[in-house]
Image (cartoon, rainbow, N blue to C red):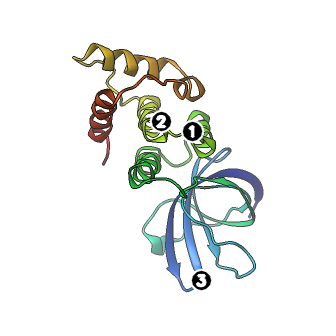
Amino acid sequence: MSIFKDSGIIIKTTKLKDKEFLYTIFTKTFWKILAKKKFSKKEKSLDLWYYINFEIETSKKIESLKTSEIINKIRFIKILNEFQTSNRNFIEINNYLILLNTILKKTAFWVENMEILEIIKAINIYSKEDLEIKLILANLKIINILWELDIQNKNETISKILKFISKNNIKTILKLNWINEEIKKELQNINKLYIW
């Protein structure tokens, strides 16, 4: 058994049994991991989209979960920030969940990717009104980081945007502000091609 400190975003929660939960966390140091924790009335319950600091206690494999991944224990949790759902519409919340699902489904366990974590951190603190399009762009950037985004498109404007996404970091991408409804719909349709 070893104990480490880390931070990361909760991308999935599963109730194992009474008062015990399994979390899939995309972390800074250990990348995507599985960790369990017992519910405590003294602590705030953890949920999706919480960006947390924590201590991780490594442990042995739990074969009954039908996974070859190591299950760790987490403790001393501090919630740093979270995706704010108040005053957000259904589409924005849904696009954020798509973003988390992309990370959950398309990233491997124990494979480092700091750029994806930077995207989540930037989105969690983004406060402007155009979040819907920013979430689409962020998800396309993650797909690009994972080598799946086809930047060629018959629409020249869309192709330029996809090339811009592939060449720039999330802070620069979030500055895009001239995207109209028609382009947003096209980008959303491209985004849907990669959802599974």
Q: From what the image shows, is residue 44 above or below residue 168?
A: below
Left/right of residue 30 with respect to residue 139 in the rendered view: right
Residues at discs 2 and 1 in contact (Cβ within 8 Å):
yes
Pointer 1 residue: 128
Q: Residue furthest bottom?
A: 18
The percent coordinates of residue 128 (x first, y second) are: 57, 38
The percent coordinates of residue 112 (x first, y second) are: 58, 39
Mark 1 secondary-structure assignment? loop
| Inter-mark Cα distance, 3 to 2 | 36 Å
Pointer 2 residue: 134
Q: Quadrant of residue 3?
A: bottom right
Q: Earlier in the sequence, mark 1 or mark 3?
A: 3
Q: Earlier in the sequence, mark 3 or mark 2?
A: 3
The percent coordinates of residue 78 (x first, y second) are: 75, 60
| Front in this rendered view, residue 19 or 180 | 180
Pointer 3 residue: 19
| Inter-mark Cα distance, 1 to 3 | 37 Å
Q: Earlier in the sequence, mark 2 or mark 1?
A: 1
Q: Write the residue at 40% across / 17% down.
A: 163
